[in-house]
Structure formats: C-alpha cells, structure tokens
C-alpha cells in the first residue's frame, strides 16, 4: 500500500476532502474520536486483509504511523 492510497481512504471518511500529509495527526488535525478511529481501522483491516493489534493502535497518531503499521502487517 502506498501512503497516497491511505490518504485517499482517510479522506473518504471525512465530511469534506482536505489536504493530508504523512505528518497529519488523526486526532489533533482531523478530529478523530475513538469511534471514527475504530471505523478507519476496521475499514483498513477489511480492505487489506490485515489485523492491527490493540497494542499497536495506541501508538498510531499520524498518517505515517498508520501507514507503517499497515506495511508491517501486509
């Protein structure tokens, strides 16, 4: 998965498309709450056939962190 694909998937969860970079913070910049965060993770797990462990989830803050976690599991 390329980071651009991940950015497009994240943008699809937002009410309107915004500029997102690797350093975009899911909570601070995009306003993700726990429910939106879990929805995104479930979507990624279904899309890419991966399972992101709960202990990894707490370390994911930015798009880059999320991308790295997905690559480790792919």
Image: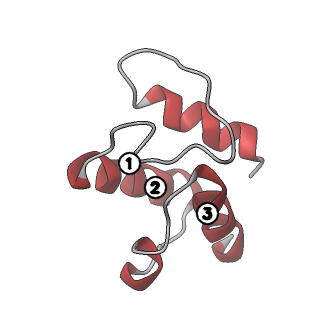
Res 8 → quadrant:
top right
Is the residue 73 above or below the residue 31 in the image?
below
- Reading the image, the residue beneath label 2 is 46
Give the color scheme: rainbow, by chain, secondary structure or one colour. Answer: secondary structure
The x and y percentages for residue 24 are 58, 43
The x and y percentages for residue 26 are 45, 47
Q: Residue at x 54, y 64 (%)?
A: 49
Q: As drawn, which residue projects farthest toward the right?
A: 2
Give the quadrant of the C terminus.
bottom right
**Element on which disc 1 rests:** loop
Res 34 → quadrant:
bottom left
- Reading the image, the residue beneath label 3 is 65
Q: Residue at x 40, y 31 (%)?
A: 13
- Reading the image, the residue beneath label 1 is 27
**Is label 3 or label 2 in front?**
3
Q: CA distance from mark 3 to mark 2?
A: 19 Å
User: Residue 29 versus residue 12: which sits nearer the camera?
Assistant: 29
Q: CA distance from mark 1 to mark 2?
A: 22 Å
Badge 1 crowding class, 10 Å Cα cut-off, few under 14, some 14 to 19, many 20 or more, is some
Q: As drawn, which residue projects farthest toward the left?
A: 35
The x and y percentages for residue 19 are 61, 23
Q: CA distance from mark 1 to mark 3?
A: 13 Å
Question: In the rendered structure, which disc, 3 or 2, sits on the residue that comes first in sequence?
Answer: 2
**Element on which disc 3 rests:** helix
Say the numbered circle drawn on residue 12: none
């Amino acid at each position: 998965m390329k980071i651009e694909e991940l950015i497009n998937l994240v943008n699809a969860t937002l009410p309107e498309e915004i500029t997102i970079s690797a350093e975009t913070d899911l909570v601070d910049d995009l306003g993700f709450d726990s429910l939106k965060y879990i929805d995104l993770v479930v979507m990624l797990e279904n899309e890419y056939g991966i399972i992101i462990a709960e202990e990894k989830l707490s370390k994911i803050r930015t798009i880059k962190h999320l991308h790295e976690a997905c690559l480790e599991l792919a």
